[in-house]
């Protein structure tokens, strides 16, 4: 179609055909280059299907490595990071041999993070034969979940394998008749369990056995033998402190000697380096199970108070609650503290209560009734506290 000046309008169909041909030609021109590039990416140098060296390792070797890891893990995160690496490590990580070697710190669980999955994992480790898992889960079930039978059986399973903390915890249960009535106390069984734990070197059991022998509590009184066990407990406590890192030793000034009154005028001038005799040895680190109990009843919203009229052991590193009213022994001097065992009383007396205990003529219990004589299962009077210093 022509205009008045003789020019023609462009034909849109023709132009479209020309543009399509140019585009196709450009594509064809670069198609070879693209193919060459693809072929270079698929070269044998990069596409050779070499087997993964990790896949070639036998399962027995991987399980052995995982056992080393779990036995030396410093936290649960060390184990979790391995499980999320790949499917094979996740599967082998739940092998019974690996779980049986899990360390005490790897099984640490916070009260605020307690869940059914955490309980299942601890149960899986306990079924694999891990004594630390048996003890931790047993303490949680017995005291926190109030499943007395299951908790005691798990601790007994660990005690059969000569787990010292389990033996001592069962001894405390026998001394107090925990989970039952006052008539369920078995002092002789408690002393026997305590002696077994003391033989294995448990410091609290050595202290408890020493006080039992000095008092004639559940066993024939033998003051000299009880004294020997108390000295042995202090010696083991000092050895545990000396095994700490140098920075931890020098930070708190633990080697300062504050001689007790009846030692200041003694003939000897040397420092005995024992906590019961005035040396400021730092408090031992509580077991993860005891830390869980403390968090459960004091700091966690999941637990709360043990129950109406029930009290917690006043020693900060214990966390055990009463299973019935007036189960724990109470200080007959001030009446403000109570303890599940003589070992807890001895430690708390040195660490805190010695500076706070003030005599009162009478005091009132939680229900507002006069209880000046301490009408619970037992009282820890001034003579019990002085045993720590004697």
Image: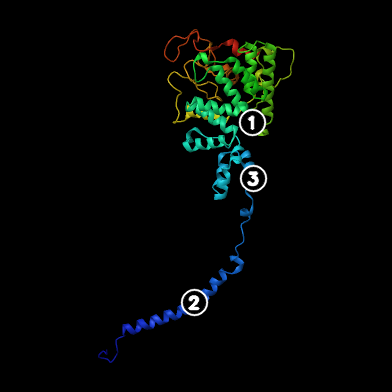
Residue 383 screen position, x and y as percent: 60, 10
| In the displayed structure image, the side of residue 339 where residue 309 appears, left or right | left
What residue is pinned by disc 1? 251
Name the residue: 60% across, 15% down.
Answer: 188
> Which is nearer the eye, 297 or 364?
297
**Vertical placement of 338 versus 70: above or below?**
above
Residue annotated with mark 2: 31
* Circle 3 residue: 65
Does dot 1 land on a helix, a strand or a loop?
A: helix
**Which one is in front, 244 or 180?**
180
Quadrant of the image occupied by residue 256: top right
Tell me how the rendering is colored: rainbow
Residue 283 image position (x, y, % from top left): 61, 25
Instruction: Decide: is 33 above or below 107.
Output: below
Contact, CB < 8 Å: mark 2 with mark 1?
no
Residue 286 visible in this rendered orientation of the protein: no
Give the residue displayed 31% in from the left and 85% down from the top: 11
Picture coordinates of residue 249, whole percent (x, y):
66, 30
| Quadrant where the image shows the C terminus | top right
Give how far across and how far down residue 344 sits, in percent: 58, 20
The answer to which of 182 and 69 lies nearer the viewer is 182
Are discs 3 and 2 less than 8 Å apart at CB? no
At 42% across and 20% down in the image, what residue appears? 308
């Amino acid at each position: 179609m022509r205009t008045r000046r003789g020019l023609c309008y462009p034909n849109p169909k023709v132009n479209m055909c020309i543009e399509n041909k140019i585009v196709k030609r450009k594509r064809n021109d670069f198609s070879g280059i693209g193919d060459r590039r693809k072929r270079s990416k698929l070269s044998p140098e990069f596409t050779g299907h070499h087997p993964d060296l990790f896949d070639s390792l036998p399962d027995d070797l991987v399980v052995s490595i995982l056992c080393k890891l779990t036995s030396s893990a410093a936290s649960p995160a060390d184990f979790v990071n391995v499980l999320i690496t790949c499917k094979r490590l996740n599967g082998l990580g739940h092998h019974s041999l690996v779980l049986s070697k899990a360390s005490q710190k790897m099984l640490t669980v916070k009260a605020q993070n307690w869940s059914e999955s955490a309980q299942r994992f601890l149960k899986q480790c306990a079924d694999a034969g891990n004594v630390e898992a048996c003890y931790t889960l047993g303490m949680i079930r017995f005291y926190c979940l109030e499943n007395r039978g299951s908790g005691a059986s798990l601790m007994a399973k660990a005690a059969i394998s000569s787990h010292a903390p389990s033996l001592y915890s069962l001894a405390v249960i026998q001394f107090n008749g925990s989970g039952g009535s006052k008539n369920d106390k078995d002092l002789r069984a408690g002393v026997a369990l305590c002696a077994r734990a003391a033989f294995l070197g448990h410091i609290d059991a050595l202290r408890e056995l020493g006080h039992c022998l000095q008092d004639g509590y559940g066993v024939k009184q033998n003051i000299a033998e009880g004294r020997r066990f108390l000295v042995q407990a202090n010696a083991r406590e000092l050895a545990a402190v000396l095994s700490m890192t140098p920075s931890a030793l020098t930070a708190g000034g633990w080697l300062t000697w504050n001689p007790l009154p009846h030692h200041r005028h003694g003939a000897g001038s040397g420092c005995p380096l024992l906590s019961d005799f005035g040396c400021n040895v730092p408090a031992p680190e509580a077991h993860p199970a005891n830390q869980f109990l403390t968090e459960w009843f004091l700091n966690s919203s999941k637990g709360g108070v043990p129950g109406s009229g029930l009290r917690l052991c006043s020693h900060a590193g214990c966390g055990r609650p009463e299973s019935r009213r007036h189960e724990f022994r109470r200080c007959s001097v001030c009446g403000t503290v109570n303890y599940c065992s003589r070992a807890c009383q001895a430690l708390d007396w040195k660490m805190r209560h010695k500076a706070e205990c003030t005599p009162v003529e009478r005091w009132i219990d939680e229900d507002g009734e006069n209880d000046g004589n301490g009408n619970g299962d037992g009282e820890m009077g001034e003579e019990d506290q002085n045993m720590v210093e004697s």
